Amino acid sequence: MEEVARHDSITIILADDHQVVRAGLRMLLQAEEGFEVVAEAGDVPTTERRVAAYHPRVLILDLNMPGESSLTAIPRLRLSAPDTQIVVLTMQNDPAFAREALRGGAIGYVLKEAADSELVQAVRLAAEGRTYLNPELGARLAAEPEVANGPPDDLSAREIEVLRLIALGHTNTEIAAHLYLSVRTVESHRAHIQQKTGRTTRAALVAYAREHELL
């Protein structure tokens, strides 16, 4: 009977760089009948290894982990593990992040502030191949036409985030600490932003951010 129960359970991997957060999420999820947390991860490479090893039905993925952005990893995870559905759990309440995550292949988008009330439902829906989007974000996405408010000049959500912090006066080192990235990664994002926007100085980037209402 135990083997049947485990076979029928919704297996889950938790990917978040804060151990305390993972512990709280594990308690929340394993209190639900039919949920089984099989592994945890704290960065993108470990997440990819855990998914390949455990083949969970659902991956709960934080967007802000050290190193590579989880947003860029979502399409790769979906390609390598098509039977694993991805539910993003994040503090990022900007519709641009939700849009990019869903485009990349995520099936759920839950804000951490609403995890207690929304995460279990999102996981159950994901296991059935159904989408869950935080209601407030869903309403904002519906109210904001993608063409008018989509990322300008093909900037990714991460690049927009870096651009905003640049425009707010933060140094590369401060941005790296804020986003849990290496300084080299921030410098790379900055170079891509400058290339895409055609703006090279800080003043020009600040003006660009204001022109496109990114502040």
Image: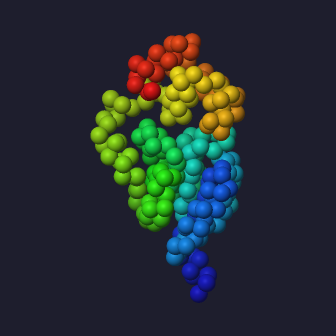
Q: On the rendered image, what quadrant is the C terminus found in?
A: top left
Splitting the image into 4 quarters, where does residue 170 fall?
top right
The residue lying furthest to the bottom in this view is: 1
**Residue 208 visible in this rendered orientation of the protein:** yes
Q: On the rendered image, what quadrant is the N terminus found in?
A: bottom right
Left or right relative to 135: residue 120: right
User: What colouring does the structure picture have?
Assistant: rainbow
Which residue is rendered at x = 50% and y = 43% of the image?
Answer: 92
Is the residue 54 above or below the residue 98 in the image?
A: below
Splitting the image into 4 quarters, where does residue 49 fall?
bottom right
Residue 75 percent location from the top left of the image: 53, 45
Is the residue 4 above or below the residue 129 in the image?
A: below
Residue 187 percent location from the top left of the image: 65, 25
Which residue is rendered at x = 29% and y = 40% of the image?
Answer: 143
Splitting the image into 4 quarters, where does residue 69 fall?
top right
Residue 35 percent location from the top left of the image: 55, 71
Residue 39 percent location from the top left of the image: 66, 62
Is the residue 24 above or below the residue 71 in the image?
A: below
Count of all numbered marks drawn on residues in the image: 0
**Residue 185 visible in this rendered orientation of the protein:** no
Which residue is rendered at x = 40% and y = 25% of the image?
Answer: 213
Which residue is rendered at x = 40% and y = 52% of the image?
Answer: 133
